[in-house]
Image (cartoon, coloured by chain):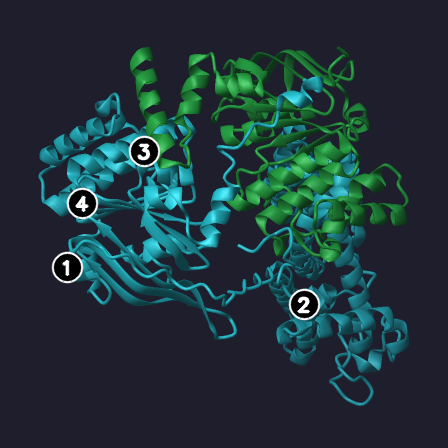
Amino acid sequence: MSDPSLAVPDVASVPAPGSLRRLLRNPLGVAAIGWLALVLVSALLASWLSPYDPDEPAARDILAGPGSAHLLGADGSGRDILSRLLHASQISVAGAALTLLVAAVIGIGAGLLAGYYGGWTETAGTWVASLIMALPGIVALLAVRAVVGPSLWTTMAIFGVLLSPAFYRVVHAAVSGVRNELYVDAARVSGLSDPRIIGRHVLTVVRAPAIILAAGVGSAAIALQSGITFLGLGDPSVPTWGGMLNDAFANIYTAPVALAWPSLAIGVTCVALTLLSNALRDALERTAEPAPTRHDADDEHAAPPAPSGGEALLEVRDLVVAYRRPDGSARRVVDEVSLSVREGEVHGLVGESGSGKTQTAFSILRLLPAGARTSGSIVFDGTELTGLPAKRLTRLRGDAIAYIPQEPMSNLDPSFTVGSQLVEPIRTHRGYGRAQARARALELLDRVGIPDPERTFRAYPHEISGGMAQRVLIAGAVACEPKLLIADEPTTALDVTVQAEVLDLLRDLRDDLGMGVLLVTHDFGVVADLCDRVSVMRHGRVVETGPVDALFAAPQHPYTRALFDAVIATGEPAGSPQDGADA
Amino acid sequence: MNEPLLQVRDLVVEYPVKGLRRPPFRALHGVGLDVDAGETVGLVGESGSGKTTFGRAVLGLAPVTSGSIRFRGREISRLSRSARRGLAAQIQVVFQDPYTSLNPSLVIERTLVEPLLARRVPADEARRRVRDLLDQVHLPADAGRRLPREFSGGQRQRIAIARALALSPALIVCDEPVSALDLSTQARVLSLFREIQERTGVAYLFVSHDLAVVRHLSHRVAVMRAGEIVESGEVRQVTDHPQHPYTQKLFLAAPLPDPQAQRERREARRRLRAETA
């Protein structure tokens, strides 16, 4: 960890490439934008581009094929297909835009209100949204048309209302996720008004999903509009893609080619909108990769391995764990670490976040994420663990080597009882029968100080407290009387009073079973309480190692001394008598 | 003795429980506490003790069922949203989690400038003040142009402190502001808190589960358990000679970073347990 008050973070200050640039690098996105721009331009310039009046029939041109007079041919009334197509795109684009506008205004507005304020607005909003979604869209549109007449605009606006739940759901989900974020609380405490908080902090969350959804809704609007006008339910006096399709369909045997033009216009536009929506999603929702933290090649060297009495249970030599960076170079998170744990000894591995202490523990258990490269030697009880076949290692883990995690709750499966999670490993490793394993589990629960083992045995993980859950995991870990216990911050998630009891329990178990313990922690108090030996880690290296009493009495390495200086537990309290005037 | 800056009396906070006719959950059972101008009051407790709820009630973020919260003599527990906004300049907050208390998609300057702009400070003036604030919390001057994810936990907490200081408040509620930080970072952030108090005379209500941290920074300490304050007083009185059995248990449970002293403390805790059992 670099000194936050002095060091300027070594993150390149180049801004992440803009979403627009990412969008333009996507060939499908560019093609989609190109087509949509073409449609838009031809809609805007239809009156100038059209060679003929789109509504002017010419009896001699009825069903004329494509040629010099009519580029795309003429329809069943002798009207120029190209001119009609251009004018129809006006209606299609405007109609889709109207649908989109209505859906977005209603859906996003209601979603923001319901998501931000919760309570009755949320109940009402979700009810109405569900109700609208339950309505069969086409039937509702037909009913509306029967009442208000064949206006395309009314139809599209109503369709917008029918689609608004899509926006509502997305926005509501995003906003209610943000509502309880601390930065929204902080903004409230800063005295910002609700509209300001929504505008500044909430809309930014909604922006990306809403834009993506808009492209999809636009495509649906064009498809539905074409469907309705194809069925002849639109306004017959204006040219539309669906209306043209209808006309061409009537003459499908005499002029089949005429069918192709409106079909292409509808199909390609819908496909382009869908592709645009995908490209937008890729561009907007891809979070920037975290900048790799630089590993300073400083002049620290691993402390020479302390001479260990011959009967070391675990002997780690020159362990290296490295991960590949995006640029191909390797980042060492554990750098030539050596340590040993003897039988009946608690070895503390202490360091700040990012020091590599958990990575060291995990590499002994071979629990590192894929992509990690390790080298060095790990000898446990006379067996070299590196290169051991996975099958044999699995047999060791949970039997001779046990593990206690930091978060007790997330390490118990919520859908099984505590008892079944204890019994299963005992049966696997010890080959016990059901009743025998159950008796052993109850005995273990009693041993770890659980007041009513029977009840806890039948309980589900959510029914027990965090301290109890950690005791259950400890019971599971010592079930097969392991020789080595690896505990990764076993008390960090617990209250101090519970922590003290769990530390007592670990000490008792160590005494009873004579097992070696590798304890990963950041807390010097825990080290002082439980450990016999301690290794201090920084930037992946062990900077100092030694017996606890000696190391605490006279830390040698400057980093260890700096850490001890940062400990405030033994300092003088703030309220010294001379500034008692305000007390 | 003048009237305290913050005076809380018989504060009760209840949260509704889902389900018909279920009684609400009572998080605070009539809690009283004073904070004077310029002092730090530490509020210690384990998870579920109600210490965070107390802080949120003072900030107007938790529903007050009964009791009173007076700030400079004015009742603030049942203010409307707009009246509450007027109080923002006076009572501020630093939250525990430096990762979720900053909007990830806004650059630091935008987050810091916002409360100033809301009070109609001209934009130029506001930006100048923000640079000044970043300097006060020892962050580089160009920090304002970067996004929260470019900062470490300790640096983010400095930004959160800068945000709290922006409106020059009289009281800052600190909800576990250093528990997510590494040991050495923790010490530096705590000394920043102290430095700011010496310079500006701001008062802190310092909520924490960590006795060492509270002892390090507070003038007075209150110990909470199950929604009640079991003991309160001067920091030396409470931390060196705790009276209530729970306070004694709490203090003896915290391990000391010294093997010899910790062995003695462990023995003392065993004796206490034997006595109370």
- In the picture shown, does residue B97 fall above or below B56? below
Q: Earlier in the sequence, mark 1 or mark 3?
A: 1
Q: Mark 2: which secondary structure?
A: loop
Q: Are marks 4 and 1 on the same chain?
A: yes
* Crowd tier of the residue under label 1, counting other residues whose Cα lies within 10 Å: few below 14, some 14–19, many 20 or above: few
Q: Quadrant of the C terminus of chain A?
A: top right
* Image disc number at residue A382: 1
User: Chain in green?
Assistant: B
Q: Is residue A420 above or below residue A74?
A: above
Q: Crowding near pointer 2: few (<14 within 10 Å), some, many (20+)?
A: few
- Residue B175 occupies quadrant: top right
Q: Secondary structure at mark 3?
A: helix
Q: From where the camera sits, is residue A401 visible?
A: yes
Q: Of A13 and A117, which appears nearest the observer?
A: A13
Amino acid found under the numbered disc labelled 4:
Pro
Residue at x 41%, y 64% (from the top left corner): A301
The disc numbered 2 marks a residue on which chain? A
Chain letter tied to cyan: A
Q: Which residue is mark 2?
A: A17
Residue pointed to by mark 4: A482
